Image (cartoon, rainbow, N blue to C red):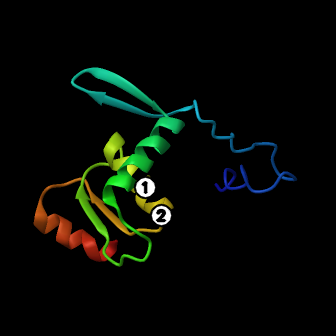
Amino acid sequence: MFKDLTVYASPQYSSYQIPENREDDVALVNLKNGQKTEFTSGQLVQHANEVWQKLQGSSEDPHPVFMSADLETPLGFSTFMACSTNFKKIYISGTYNMSTMLKQVPLQ
């Protein structure tokens, strides 16, 4: 029942390893209007840095970032990366329904 728990636990139990993340590895595949766009890890980091520059936030700013987006989109994921790497609280909701968002806020 629990045989998969030790997959990455310790070298003495398993030879599996988490693969190294390289800059040119495809990290996100986005489909929009029938078009497929692939983003590499390096591109996502670059987008995250650009988003952070536009937010002009700091880790001391107590106000979180609220946005209605999806983590499966390049903007949503890059914003999440930008805020989390700079210790800024972020709330990303996949809905534009305000009542649903307000119900989810306490969980965040």
* Image point (68%, 40%), residue name: 19
Residue under the image location 36 percent in, 50 percent down: 51
What numbered label is drawn on residue 86? 2
Task: Give the amino acid at mark 1.
Answer: Ala
- Disc 1 designates what residue? 82
Judge from the rendering whether residue 76 lies leftward or rightward of residue 101; answer left or right: right
Residue 65, quarter of picture: bottom left
62 with respect to 21 (left or right): left
Spatial separation of the CA atoms under disc 2 and disc 1:
6 Å
**Number of residues whose C-alpha sits closer than 10 Å to that of mark 2, classed few (under 14), some (14–19) or many (20 or more):** some
Q: Amino acid at mark 2?
A: Asn
Residue for point 31% across, 28% down? 31
Quadrant of the drawing holding the C terminus: bottom left
Question: Label 1's element?
Answer: helix
Q: Is residue 8 left or right of residue 43?
A: right
Q: Nearer the viewer, residue 40 or 59?
A: 59
Q: Please tell me whether residue 94 is drawn above or below residue 36 in the rendered image.
A: below
